[in-house]
Amino acid sequence: MKIGIDIDGVLCNWAQGFHNLLCDVVGEKRPFVVPTQWDLGNTSWTPEQIDLGWEAIRNTRDWWITLEPYRDNVNALRAFFGGGDDFYYVTSRTPSDGFSVLKQTQHWLDSLDLLLHGCSILVVDKPSFKRNVVLGLALDKFIDDKLETVVDGHPSTDWYLLSREWNKSGRPNNIKVVDTLEEYLNAPVCRLPPG
């Protein structure tokens, strides 16, 4: 089986890492609150501060290596390896200083023993590009935490939404939602009919 997995929000805690970066950039420690919108629009950060955070990512050496994993999901994926499946990490990341985003992503996955034989990494510029990558790779199933990416998914692949606070609002009834990566990995492939 060809299994696709997003990284940020699925395997790593991007929201916490971005929050910590914003605290450093603004020079103000704030408690972390899990966002309820994917673009962080509902947090205590202003749009201008969020823009500063993106600029800080671009100027921070190897920022993507610093992110903390969601341990439960990492452990579930490790336990699932070995069954002969091919794994494709498809992620959208802003370039940062230092190594390329691809090399940073490789290092991060390798440090967690998630880059084994039969694994490929694809980094795209925008989340909306994932649909065509997944389609071109003919993946059997793909999981993401961004609602719009899953809703836009082509019916030739089984698309799953990993339930997060930031994707609970506005979910259509016809998408597959899982609470854990383990649940996704163990789900049979059962594509939705086109249309």
Image (spheres, rainbow, N blue to C red):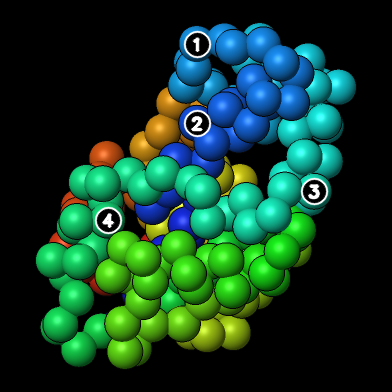
- Confirm or deny contact between disc 1 and disc 3 (CB under 8 A): no
Which numbered marker is on residue 16? 2
- Confirm or deny contact between disc 3 and disc 4 (CB under 8 A): no
Q: Residues within 10 Å of mark 2 (few under 14, many from 20)?
A: some
Q: Secondary structure at mark 3?
A: helix
Q: In the image, what residue type sits under mark 1?
A: Pro
Q: Secondary structure at mark 4?
A: helix
In space, the residues marked 1 and 3 are separated at their CA atoms by 24 Å
- Confirm or deny contact between disc 3 and disc 2 (CB under 8 A): no
Residue receiving disc 1: 31
Which numbered marker is on residue 59? 3
Q: Secondary structure at mark 1?
A: loop
In space, the residues marked 2 and 1 are separated at their CA atoms by 10 Å
Q: In the image, what residue type sits under mark 3?
A: Asn
The answer to whether residue 181 is left or right of residue 16 is: left
Residue receiving disc 4: 74
Q: Residues within 10 Å of mark 1 (few under 14, many from 20)?
A: few
Q: In the image, what residue type sits under mark 2?
A: Gln
In space, the residues marked 4 and 1 are separated at their CA atoms by 25 Å
Q: Is residue 8 above or below residue 195?
A: above
Q: Earlier in the sequence, mark 2 or mark 1?
A: 2
In space, the residues marked 3 and 4 are separated at their CA atoms by 28 Å
Q: Is residue 116 above or below residue 108?
A: below
**Which residue is pictured at 15% across the width and 82% down the height?**
82
